[in-house]
């Protein structure tokens, strides 16, 4: 195994308890899960980037949403992601994050080996981030299968999640690129879709189907048609593939990007020189879409619950009501929130917040910014961030 040395944090990820039989189990966070045996040769890649601008002012460039406990579990989104993957991969976890977040990641994950935390000099979108992890893993374990799972998603029904991932690994071992398809719960216009093709005959993956196409975010009428027709799944951006297959496929479409990533893995000292010249592109556009057109992508439909916590409206759906106060959801201390004939999502910053006669509002109080809006306008928070940036208020974004 090569002794690679990147600009990294000395980080260790929290683990589930391991019994005497060596099987890992998920930390107790409200889900009771039977012990899970790790999958040989399977690595988890966790891209931890982005600012989550629709969750401003809680989520910002310097403190993005994956570093926050937004759902009241006592674990941040990043920690929860590692918690649910560790049973499948043991200590084979690689996190790719920005240099600015390195210290916070270090503090939150006190168990991942230092060489498994890769720091990006600048954001280049998901393909370079995931590709860099793939190139590093390829040098350590040439036959490795990797799974890419975002750091800021919320997933329930962990037993079903683990079973679905096992199916994707079985397909990936045959040389395919595999994604998890999320069962739509409504005609959403906020997600891209996967259109399924015929079933595949792969041992250990009875649910696997070919991918006919990846579809961009549709309008409301088209999304409703997808839901009625069936055979369409939400694209959550979770991909499972052999590290070498991912890089070889990338090389067929963007050889300079693939070569650059492999050169960094071979000589980490070149990171600062090569990284700024890499193509800035998402993995969907770089690999998934063209590979699907070539018939090289499979999907494993999954029924576990999933949310990308994209805005305060979706966050509200994940939060329980304060006991005795229907419709009141609080991030933080409920004792600091007083409501009189009012409902909504309230995130406090230490001060007491009082709401009177307001329905379905969002109030977020931080030391330097206060957000007040109707929940139905949750998507418009991004416009506030853009306005602040235009005004030069980078201290607030």
Image: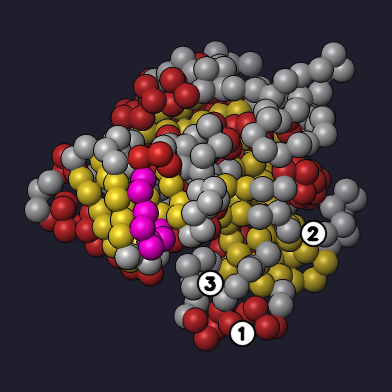
First-in-chain label (3 vs 2):
3
The CA distance from mark 3 to mark 1 is 11 Å
Q: Residue at x 54, y 48 (%)?
A: 323
Q: Quadrant of the N terminus?
A: top right
Secondary structure found at label 2 = loop
- The residue under label 2 is 208
Category of crowding for the residue at label 2, using alpha-carbon neighbours closer than 10 angstroms: few (below 14), some (14–19), many (at least 20): many
In this rendered view, identify the residue nearer to me: 109 or 326: 326
Q: Residue at x 69, y 24 (%)?
A: 16
**Image location (x, y in percent) of residue 348:** 33, 42
Magenta range is 337-344
The CA distance from mark 3 to mark 2 is 23 Å
The CA distance from mark 1 to mark 2 is 23 Å
In this rendered view, identify the residue nearer to me: 103 or 242: 103
**Quadrant in the rendering for residue 226:** bottom right
**Image location (x, y in percent) of residue 38:** 78, 29
In this picture, is 5 found above or below 120? above
Q: Is residue 210 visible?
A: yes
Q: Is 135 covered by the magenta stretch? A: no
- The residue under label 3 is 188
**Image location (x, y in percent) of residue 392:** 10, 48
**Image location (x, y in percent) of residue 252:** 55, 53
Q: Left or right: 249 with respect to 16?
A: left
């Amino acid at each position: 195994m090569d002794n690679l040395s990147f600009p990294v944090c000395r980080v260790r990820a929290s683990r589930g308890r391991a019994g005497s039989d060596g099987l890992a189990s998920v930390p107790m966070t409200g889900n009771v899960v039977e012990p899970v045996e790790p999958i040989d040769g399977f690595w988890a890649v966790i891209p931890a980037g982005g600012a989550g601008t629709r969750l401003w002012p809680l989520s910002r460039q310097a403190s993005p949403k994956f570093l926050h406990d937004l759902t009241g579990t006592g674990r941040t989104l990043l920690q929860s992601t590692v918690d649910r993957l560790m049973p499948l991969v043991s200590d084979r976890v690689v996190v790719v994050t920005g240099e600015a977040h390195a210290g916070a990641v270090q503090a939150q994950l006190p168990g991942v080996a230092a060489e498994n935390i890769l720091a990006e000099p600048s954001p280049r979108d998901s393909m370079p981030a995931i590709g860099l992890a793939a190139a590093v893993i390829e040098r350590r374990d040439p036959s490795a299968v990797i799974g890419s799972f975002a750091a800021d998603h919320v997933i329930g029904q962990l037993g079903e999640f683990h079973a679905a991932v096992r199916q994707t690994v079985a397909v990936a071992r045959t040389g395919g690129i595999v994604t998890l398809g999320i069962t739509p719960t409504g005609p959403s216009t906020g997600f891209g879709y996967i259109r399924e093709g015929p079933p595949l005959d792969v041992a250990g993956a009875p649910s696997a189907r070919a991918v006919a196409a990846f579809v961009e975010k549709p309008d409301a009428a088209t999304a409703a048609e997808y839901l009625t027709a069936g055979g369409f799944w939400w694209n959550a951006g979770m991909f499972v593939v052999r590290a070498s297959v991912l890089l070889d496929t990338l090389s067929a479409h963007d050889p300079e990007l693939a070569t650059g990533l492999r050169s960094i893995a071979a000589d980490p000292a070149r990171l600062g020189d090569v990284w700024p010249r890499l193509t800035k592109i998402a993995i969907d556009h770089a690999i998934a879409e063209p590979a699907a057109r070539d018939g090289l992508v499979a999907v494993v439909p999954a029924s576990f619950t999933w949310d990308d916590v994209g805005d305060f409206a979706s966050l509200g759906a994940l939060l329980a009501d304060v006991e005795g106060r229907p419709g009141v959801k609080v991030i933080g201390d409920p004792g600091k929130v007083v409501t009189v004939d009012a409902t909504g999502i309230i995130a406090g910053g230490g001060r007491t917040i009082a709401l009177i006669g307001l329905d379905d509002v969002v109030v977020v109080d931080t030391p330097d910014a206060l957000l007040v809006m109707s929940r139905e306008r949750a998507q418009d928070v991004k416009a506030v961030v853009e306005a602040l940036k235009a005004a030069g208020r980078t201290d607030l974004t």
